[in-house]
Image (tube, rainbow, N blue to C red):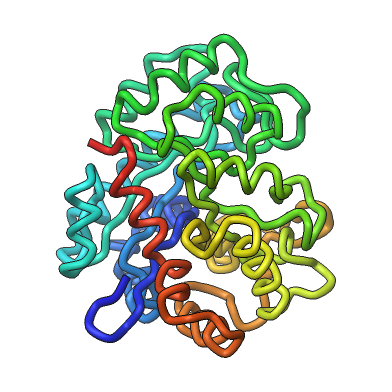
Amino acid sequence: MRRGDQIQVADGHSDLLQELVFAEQHGEDNPFRARWLEQLQDGGVVLQVCAVYESPQADPAVAFREVVRQIASFHTAVESNPELFAVAGRRDVDRVETGGLGLVLAIEGVSSFGEDLWPLDLVARLGVRVLAPTWNEQNAFAHGCDHDGGLTELGRRLIDRVPSLGMVIDLAHASPQTMSDVLERAPEGAVFVSHASCRAVYDHRRNLDDAQLTAIAEHGGVVCLMPHPLVVDPGRPTMNRFIDHVDHAVSVLGADRVGLGGDFLKQIARATEMGRHSQDGVEIEATVEGLEGPRDYPRLLEALRAHGYSEADVDGIAGGNLLRFLAASPLP
């Protein structure tokens, strides 16, 4: 989408809420303004999906308290900054075109629910509009990408309930069987992938094969591509290599089903107590060359133009496709 002559970005995934909680606990006032607002504006971001994440290894009672803490930080950010608004429904998606920065509240994995469904209704009332049943783990509801299983009976009940509560389902981190089970069960247009890339370009379990890409598109969803070296290619973490993923996704899905899901962890890792842990030998702080945070989105869009993409295709990939998906989704 555009504001005036400038293409704007809708980003399918950020873990910035963890940083906000950390900063608030250390006495910072309005850390969203200090740490994120300007860089999102500089990058042309008009809609940002903000994921609540808590370690799936944590005790559910402790983890759910942390989930609520991150939700509180989300609402504090919105209330403290007049430029922001929380996306509660489709009308708010439309507001993106008229100004301001829309934030979408998401949950990345429901291990904190334990073996209960009641937290689902509560987080819906607290404004969650995107829900992923798993991170990489196996929980009481579903299997993540580190496992071979799919939805459990409790997970099937969860998936049946999510769209009726005005939420969309995110299949990032899902196992192949979980993805298949959800797509078979969920209503069309209720499922997308917030941050992943293409297995045909770089073979990693977090990436999607062509059959999965096609299934998401045929179900009415969008795949938001993730520019992190872990899934782009740790040996060649470059802008051009990320564009290889864009090219492949477009060749399989069409340019109208591809979006962006930044998952920019460098700043968050350095600003919090995450440390320098790694996954599959790739540090969490690693970045794609020239695409280290949301400020670099204009550089990516220019690279796509130089690569031969039309303005209409760049517009869609940058944000138009994700916004259209959300506007047509089960959001209230």
Q: Is residue 319 above or below residue 208?
A: below
Q: Position of residue 250 (x, y in %)?
A: 60, 64
Position of 317 with respect to 74 (left or right) is right
- Residue displayed at 73% across by 60% down: 230
Q: Quadrant of residue 205?
A: top right
Q: Is residue 285 visible?
A: no
Kindly give the residue lying farthest to the bottom in the view shown.
306
Q: Quadrant of residue 328?
A: top left
- Residue displayed at 67% across by 32% down: 144
Q: Position of residue 266 (x, y in %)?
A: 59, 67
Image quadrant where one finds the C terminus? top left
- Residue displayed at 83% across by 57% down: 281
Q: Is residue 112 above or below residue 92?
A: above
Image quadrant where one finds the N terminus? bottom left
Position of 59 with respect to 81 (left or right) is right
Number of numbered tags placed on the structure image: 0
Q: Is residue 323 visible?
A: yes
The residue closer to the viewer here, 320 or 284, is: 320
The residue closer to the viewer here, 65 or 247, is: 247
Q: Position of residue 14 (x, y in %)?
A: 48, 56
Q: Is residue 50 above or below residue 62?
A: below
